[in-house]
């Protein structure tokens, strides 16, 4: 079994004192080395995504906008905090291209699964708009690569970043060939402010967009129930040929930007469920793609644990333990969501 490691850390895409900086990826390779995982992984270089690959997910206007501001030395791209430096356009192409290259390896049978440790992240980047620290939507480029280059008819994307994957939803909202599932914190004034259960897709895409909007402090048990009672039956109904995972580690209870309450043990349970779904539904073809995660020790340990699961190893590391406060009971919410999605 070959497990891919794509590493595109984008050191030149960094804004001083910004939470999404090269510091997020700087410790990942040393942590994998200390854990003894690197020798078991197959490194895959990240080629730059072509404009054609990017245009499968984005308008040419957005691509050229990112390029032009980057060529001018950088700056803010929106009214929030999405930035580029003089190197960001080329580095964002590597992030998206690395994910597409990993899909090529997995779909050709050269690799079984993998994890793309790339930045800038992507799941907030919409068809024609950057947002939420994201320039190009890496997971969307990967999904389209599977479809265009390998003839895949059904791709499932599961996004467990603590923030709603508004960009991925936007790109596939009218598409029945991609099932998008987002599990996220949904609270007043919490970014990006959308991701409710009524956002189910339109036209051909109706009922192929499933949002799981959670209250704060759901914790391990609540997330486990979400995957067991909502996500697994919907994936089984869809029967994907490839599973892509937008893996954000900002749902951990120590993350400074959110308050979802997951532990590293809870994250590992999610990872192993997803691998089980992939084994059952699509011959194990699964690619994890890094999104958020801003407590750097949690991020490193979480990445290590995903690779352990991809390699079929049992032991995990969780030096932080469970969330100290009681978990929010999601029983009522789950019943409403099951009725709403007819699960």
Image (cartoon, rainbow, N blue to C red):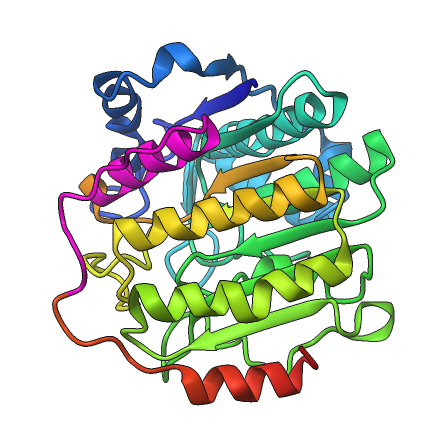
Which quadrant holds the C terminus? Answer: bottom right
Instruction: Give the magenta-colored segment's residue range.
Output: 298-323
Measured from the top left, where is residue 38 in percent x and y?
A: 36, 15
For image coordinates 37% across by 84% down, the residue present is 188
**Above/below status of 97 relative to 256:** above
Residue 303 among magenta residues: yes
Viewer-nearest residue: 313 or 172: 313
Q: Answer whether residue 65 is visible to the viewer in this image.
A: no
Q: Residue at x 53, y 86 (%)?
A: 335
Q: Quadrant of the N terminus?
A: top right
**On screen, residue 76 above or below 66:** below
Report x, y in % for residue 42: 50, 14
- Picture quadrant of residue 254: bottom left
Q: Where is residue 16, by image quadrant?
A: top left
The residue depicted at 57 percent of the width and 55 percent of the height is 158
Measuring from the top left, give residue 49's x and y in whole percent: 65, 28
Front residue of 119 and 277: 277
Indicate yes or no whether the magenta region holds residue 242.
Answer: no
243 relative position to 122: left or right = right
Q: Nearer the viewer, residue 87 or 109?
A: 109
Is 20 positioned to the left or the right of 103 in the image? Answer: left
Question: Residue 77 vs residue 232: left or right?
Answer: left
| Farthest top residue in view | 39
């Amino acid at each position: 079994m070959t497990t891919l490691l794509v590493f595109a850390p984008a050191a030149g895409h960094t804004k001083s004192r910004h939470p999404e900086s090269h510091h997020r990826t700087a410790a990942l390779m040393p942590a994998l080395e200390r854990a003894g995982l690197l020798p078991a992984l197959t490194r895959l270089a990240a080629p730059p995504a072509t404009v054609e690959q990017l245009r499968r997910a984005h308008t040419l206007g957005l691509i050229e906008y990112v390029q032009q501001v980057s060529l001018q030395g950088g700056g803010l791209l929106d009214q929030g905090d999405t930035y580029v430096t003089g190197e960001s356009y080329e580095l964002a192409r590597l992030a998206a291209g690395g994910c597409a290259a990993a899909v090529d390896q997995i779909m050709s049978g050269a690799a079984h699964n993998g994890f793309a440790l790339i930045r800038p992240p992507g799941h907030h980047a919409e068809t024609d708009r950057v947002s939420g620290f994201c320039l190009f939507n890496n997971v969307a480029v990967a999904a389209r690569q599977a479809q265009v280059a390998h003839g895949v008819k059904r791709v499932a994307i599961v996004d467990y970043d603590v923030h709603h994957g508004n960009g991925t939803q936007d790109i596939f909202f009218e598409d029945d060939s991609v099932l998008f599932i987002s599990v996220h914190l949904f609270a007043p004034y919490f970014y990006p402010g959308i991701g409710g259960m009524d956002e189910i897709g339109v036209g051909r895409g109706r009922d192929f967009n499933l949002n799981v909007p959670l209250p704060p402090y759901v914790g391990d048990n609540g997330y486990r129930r979400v995957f067991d009672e909502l996500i697994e039956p919907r994936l089984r109904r869809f029967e994907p040929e490839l599973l892509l995972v937008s893996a954000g580690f900002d749902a951990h209870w120590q993350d400074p930007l959110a308050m979802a309450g997951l532990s590293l043990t809870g994250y590992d349970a999610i990872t192993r469920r997803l691998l089980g779904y992939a084994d059952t539904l699509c011959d194990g073809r699964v690619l994890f793609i890094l999104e958020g995660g801003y407590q750097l020790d949690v991020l490193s340990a979480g990445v290590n644990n995903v690779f352990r699961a991809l390699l079929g190893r049992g032991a995990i590391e969780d030096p932080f333990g469970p969330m100290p406060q009681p978990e929010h009971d999601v029983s009522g919410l789950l019943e409403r969501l099951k009725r709403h999605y007819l699960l």
